[in-house]
């Protein structure tokens, strides 16, 4: 399996998931579901299942996300969407989200 170096965008996306995990009512994100883990025979299947869940999480029409983010302030989902769309070569706008989080 070929993996590339992690970027600032990857770090920020991980931060977004961590923040959502702290605040979601169930305390768990979809890829922590034991069903995903037990359904995968090989490590690559598990890795791909988790990547697919993370890719879709927070996207419109992803039904699993609604139960996790329904009670969150909008800034959290906006932050996640920003992180998911941030290109690998782009410099994050830290000041924008520092300000938005301070205001929420």
Image (cartoon, rainbow, N blue to C red):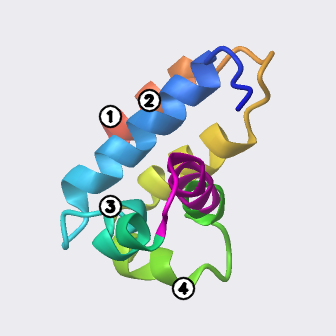
Question: Where's residue 91, x and y in %?
Answer: 71, 14
Q: Where residue 19 sits: x, y (%)?
A: 31, 45
The answer to whether 40 appears left or right of 1 in the picture is left
- Magenta range is 40-52
Mark earlier in primary sequence (4, 2)? 4
The CA span between labels 4 and 3 is 16 Å
Nearest to viewer (mark 4 / mark 2): 4
x 54%, y 20%: residue: 94
Residue 88 lies in quadrant: top right
Viewer-proximal residue among 16 and 6? 6
User: Of marks 3 and 1, which one's residue comes earlier in the chain?
Assistant: 3
Element carrying mark 1: helix
Q: Are marks 3 and 1 in contact (CB under 8 Å)?
A: no
**Residue sitting nearer the eye, 34 or 97:** 34
Q: Which residue is mark 2?
A: 99
Q: CA distance from mark 2 to mark 1?
A: 5 Å
Q: Are marks 2 and 1 in contact (CB under 8 Å)?
A: yes
Judged from the image, the secondary structure of the residue bearing numbered disc 3 is helix
Of tags 3 and 2, the one toward the viewer is 3
Earlier in the chain: of badge 4 and badge 3, it is 3
Main secondary structure along the magenta-highlighted residues: helix
For label 4, the residue is 63
Q: Residues within 10 Å of mark 1 (few under 14, many from 20)?
A: few
Disc marking residue 32: 3
- Residue picked out by circle 1: 102
Sequence-earlier tag: 1 or 4: 4
**Distance CA(mark 3)–CA(mark 1):** 29 Å
The mark lying in front, picked from 1 and 4, is: 4
Secondary structure at badge 4 equals helix
Contact (Cβ within 8 Å) of mark 4 with mark 3: no
Q: Earlier in the sequence, mark 3 or mark 2?
A: 3
């Amino acid at each position: 399996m070929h993996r590339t170096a992690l970027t600032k965008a990857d770090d920020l996306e991980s931060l977004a998931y961590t923040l959502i995990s702290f605040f979601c009512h169930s305390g768990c994100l979809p890829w922590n579901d034991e069903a995903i883990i037990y359904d995968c025979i090989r490590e690559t299947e598990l890795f791909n299942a988790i990547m697919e869940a993370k890719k879709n999480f927070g996207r419109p029409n992803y039904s699993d996300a609604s139960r996790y983010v329904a009670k969150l302030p909008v800034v959290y989902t906006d932050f996640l969407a920003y992180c998911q769309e941030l290109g690998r070569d782009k410099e994050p706008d830290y000041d924008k989200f520092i300000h938005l989080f301070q205001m929420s």
